[in-house]
Amino acid sequence: MRIEGTSREDHDSGPPKWIWGLLAAIVVLALLGGAAWWFLAGNKPILVQTTTVRANGQGAPADAVLQATGYVTARRQATVSAQITGTLTQVLIDEGFKVKKGQVLARLDDTGLRAGLAAAEANVRSAQATVAQMRAQLAQAEADSRRQIELAASGMTTKQAQELAATSVKAYAAQLDAAQRQAESAQAQVSQARVNFDYATVRAPFDGVVIAKSAQVGEIISPLSAGGGFTRTGVGTIVDMDSLEVDVDVNEAYIAQVKADMPCEAVLDAYPDWKVPAHVVAVIPSADRGKATVKVRVALDQKDDRVVPDMGVRVSFLATKPKVQAAPVPGVLLPAEALVTSGDGANAVFVVTDTRAAKRAVKLGADVGKFKLVTEGLKAGETVVLSPPAELKDGSTVQNKE
C-alpha cells in the first residue's frame, strides 16, 4: 500500500501563506496612513485675512477729522414733585406720555388746605364787615361834629362839646384805618391759602415726555424727603426732547482739532443707516484724568422722535460741512482685494461662515471711491476673505490671521 504525501517540490513551489497575510496587512496600513495624511492635510485650516462688508452709505465721511463715541443726553430734565408734603389721590401720567407746560400730572389730598382756604376767606368777609361798620360810625361822628360846630357858632353848645365831637371823628377815622389794615391782612392770608391749595396740584414745568413714573396713588410725597422709608420725592421725570444733544469723550491728544460750531455727523447705534447732521456746541474746559478724555457737547441739527436719552452715538467731526447728496445706491461696499475672477470671467468672493469659506458669485455696480459696489450676491454684515490665497477653494476650512 502506497501512502501519498507532499513532495519537497510542493513545499518549494511558493512562499508560505503567512507572508501573504503580512503583505496584505502592510498594504492596508499604507492605505490607511495615506488616507489619514490626505484627510489631515486637506482639512488643515488656511490662514486668511477677513473683513466685514457694510451697506453703501455707512461709515465715516471721507473728510472726517476724527471720530468719538458718546451718549444722547437731555439738557432739560426734571423730576417733578409737589412743594408740600401730602398723600397722592390722583396720578395722571405714565411712562411715554407727552405733556404740555402747566398740564396737571397729579393731585394731593387737599382736605386740610381747602378748609384753611375757607377759613381765610371767612376772615376776609369778617374784616370787610368791620370796615363797613367803622365807615358808618365815622360818618355819624362827622355829622355830629358838623352840628356841634353850627351850635357853637350860635352859642347853643359849649366849646368842650365841640371838641369832643371832633375827637370822636378822629377816633373813628383811626379805627376805620385799623379795620382796613385788618382786611388787607385777611386778604393776604387768603392769597397764601390759595397758593398752598394750588401746591396740592402737580403740574408740568415744561413741554416734554414722561420717562419715569415714580409714585402711585396713596403714597406720600415730600420735597424734603431723602427718598427713604415710605415717602417719595417725586411723581415722575420729564424730559424736554427738544433739548437733546450728544456728549462725547474725545481723547485729549486730539482735542485741539475740535472747535466750537465745527460740523459733525452723528450715527445712532440703534439706526446705523441714519446720519444726523450736527455741530459742536462747546468743548467742556475740564479733562477726565482717569480716561484722559475731554467732554464735547454736540447739538443735533435734526429733531426726531427716534432719538431718546442715553442712546449710544458715534460722532464724526468733519473738516467741512457735508453737502446734500442723493440717496446712496443700494448695495454693499467691497474692498477691491476681496474680489476674485472665475475661469469664465465672472466675479466672485469667498464668504466665511463659521470656519468654512464658500465661493459666491457677485454682481458689481459703479465703483464707490476705493470700494467695489456689490449690488447682488452679498449682504451687509457678511464676512469676506481679503486677498484669497491660491490654495483657497470652495468649502476650505479657514482661520483668521491674528
Image (spheres, rainbow, N blue to C red):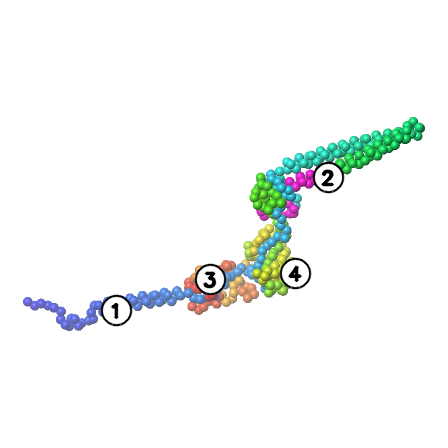
Q: Is residue 134 above or below residue 268?
A: above
The verdict on residue 174 being magenta is: no
Label 2: how many residues lie within 10 Å, few (<14), some (14-19) or many (20+)? Answer: some
Tag 1 secondary structure: helix
Alpha-carbon distance for marks 1 and 3? 47 Å
Disc 2 to disc 3: CB gap under 8 Å:
no
Residue 317 quadrant: bottom right
Disc 3 to disc 4: CB gap under 8 Å:
no
For mark 3, what is the residue? Answer: 351
Alpha-carbon distance for marks 3 and 4? 44 Å
Closest to the observer: 396 or 138?
138
Foreground tag (1 vs 4): 4
Amino acid at the residue labelled 1: Leu
Residue 60 quadrant: bottom right
* Residue furthest out toward the right: 154
Mark closer to the chain start, 1 or 3: 1
Amino acid at the residue labelled 4: Ala
Tag 3 secondary structure: strand
**Residue 401, x across and y down, in percent:** 46, 66
Region of the chain picked out in magenta, as a range:
184-213
Residue 338, numbered label = none
Mark closer to the chain start, 3 or 4: 4
Mark closer to the chain start, 2 or 4: 2
Q: Is residue 116 visible?
A: yes
For mark 2, what is the residue? Answer: 188
Label 1: how many residues lie within 10 Å, few (<14), some (14-19) or many (20+)? Answer: few
Residue 23, numbered label = 1
Foreground tag (2 vs 3): 2
Amino acid at the residue labelled 3: Val
Alpha-carbon distance for marks 2 and 3? 82 Å
For mark 4, what is the residue? Answer: 260
Alpha-carbon distance for marks 1 and 2? 122 Å
